[in-house]
Image (cartoon, rainbow, N blue to C red):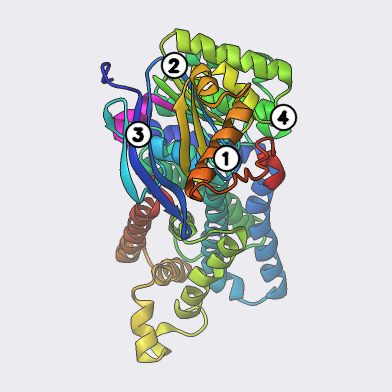
Amino acid sequence: MGNNVSAVEVRGLRVVRGGTEALRGVSLTVPRHEIVGLLGPSGSGKTTLLRSIVGVQQTTAGEVTVLGRPAGHPELRRVVGYTTQAASVYADLTVGENLRYFAAVLRAGREDVERVLEAVDMTALARRTVGELSGGQRSRVSLAAALLGRPELLVLDEPTVGLDPVLRRELWELFAGLRDEGVTILVSSHVMDEAARCDRLLLLREGELLADATLPELLERTGARDAEEAFLELVASRELAASGGGSPTAEPCSTETSEEEQR
Amino acid sequence: MSPHLTLATATRVLHQLRHDHRTIGLVIALPCVVLGLIAWIFDGTPVLDTLGPVYVGMFPVVVMFLVTSVATLRERTSGTLERLMSLPLGKGDFVTGYALAFGLLAVVQALVLVAFTVGVCGMDVAGELWLLIVCAVLSALLGSALGLGASALARTEFQAVQLMPATLFPQLVLCGLVLPRAQLPEVLEAISRVLPLTYVVDALAGVAAGTPASELGSEILLVAGFIVLAVVGGSLTLRRRTP
């Protein structure tokens, strides 16, 4: 769909939720066939941005174009795969029953269910009820559902939260494999060390985009050694600019806070 | 909307029910227990024969309303509804799929309950038994449809559960069970005419009194109309984009 355009174009997106401004005029581009990491602390607006791109968020102002069409367009529903932060699968169904239902909705065949089970390494657990699985296993089922029907764009909200390091690495290898097959992946994370796995980075804080660059570009611009330090550097310089040259007080911004603790 | 997607959704809801033995047990057994108690209390009087059929049709609407509104709220809070709204599933497919699945459960509930009250408790229905089952199933579908519509208003589990009495109790008071509708104050009588449960009770009372099916056509059609209206309303209150 729309092969000559970027995967996602966001222009001046504003979202007001419950009286507060969750996104304050965000503009960005997600190029095709790349893994783009959306990084930022909990509460920075990552989920709201992803929901706007999928077309399930009421927006206040701005434009969101996905694969050449306005976000939420009916034709996009077959080509955009989406996982929410909580595993959005039925806890009272088995893994197989869940995937067969979502496959039916996408008119994907049974062999597609086998394929995605294989992809997330859950074939052995296909007959287990989702409610009996661990949090990490549930989020893999949720990810498998998003892979059904071979979407062109994957929008993944914190897919690696709570996974052990081995599994996390396997998932990032899966993402890289999908990218090499031509899939575009927009993945959010609050763990800055996952930045190294992405082709491009979007840094979000308090509803504003701090950076839209590759990791090397970002490190060069800030003189930092890693993504976390670059993030702090960008926050500090922004606050310096905002206070009109006063002393930079980079507030202690813990980007490692687990969002699970806050649920 | 497409038959394929509606059936896939109905099948999925039935799979969920199949995993929940306790809910199936309660939906099937509880009405039998209550009707059995009524039969016992009024043993030797004609109460069971005149009111029994009406009660047989009241359980489905209440039970299905609760089950459906809680199930829909669960879809909202678990994120599965958000996923479905990002997929090529019509809102009508979602609502009709639920109505079909719970309608099937209602058929089983009605068959077991009628068999129990007639066979074990000795209820003597003057009208046709198949008509009683049809009325019970319509009442269940009405409950599901109203539950789906109402669940759009609920943000929490507490609200969802409160919506049942809020929606159904005023109808139960005005439908003629408490006082014959002809004796109601004029304003209340007029209100009772636009409430769906009124026609469910009218039809059931007709079956109890031995009215032939041909004379209950208008009541049954009205109930069916209300069901369609509630299903359409339920799919209109679903939103693909949420705040």
Which range of residues does the magenta coloring cover?
A: A72-81
**Within the magenta stretch, is there residue A55?**
no
**Residue A163 versus residue B103: which sits nearer the camera?**
A163
Q: Residues within 10 Å of mark 3 (few under 14, many from 20)?
A: few
Marking on residue B233? none
Report the residue at 65% width, 41% height from top.
A253
Amino acid type for the residue under numbered disc 1: Ala
Report the residue at 37% width, 58% height from top.
B230
**Chain containing the residue with disc 4:** A
Q: Residues within 10 Å of mark 2 (few under 14, many from 20)?
A: many
Report the residue at 53% width, 45% height from top.
A239
Give the residue number, with chain letter if any, for mark 2.
Answer: A34
Q: Secondary structure at mark 3?
A: helix
Quadrant in the picture for residue B195 = bottom left
Mark 1 to mark 2 CA distance (whole Å): 29 Å
Question: In the image, is B47 to the left or to the right of A6?
Answer: right
Q: Residue A9: where, in percent of width, then height? A: 33, 30
Give the residue number, with chain letter if any, for mark 4.
Answer: A133
Mark 2 or mark 4, which is nearer the start of the sequence?
2
**Chain containing the residue with disc 3:** B
Q: Residue B193: where, in percent of width, then height? A: 34, 76
Q: Tell me if residue A159 can be seen.
A: no
Report the residue at 62% width, 43% height from top.
A250
Mark 2 or mark 1, which is nearer the start of the sequence?
2
Mark 4 to mark 2 CA distance (whole Å): 31 Å
Give the residue number, with chain letter if any, for mark 3.
Answer: B3
Q: Secondary structure at mark 1?
A: helix
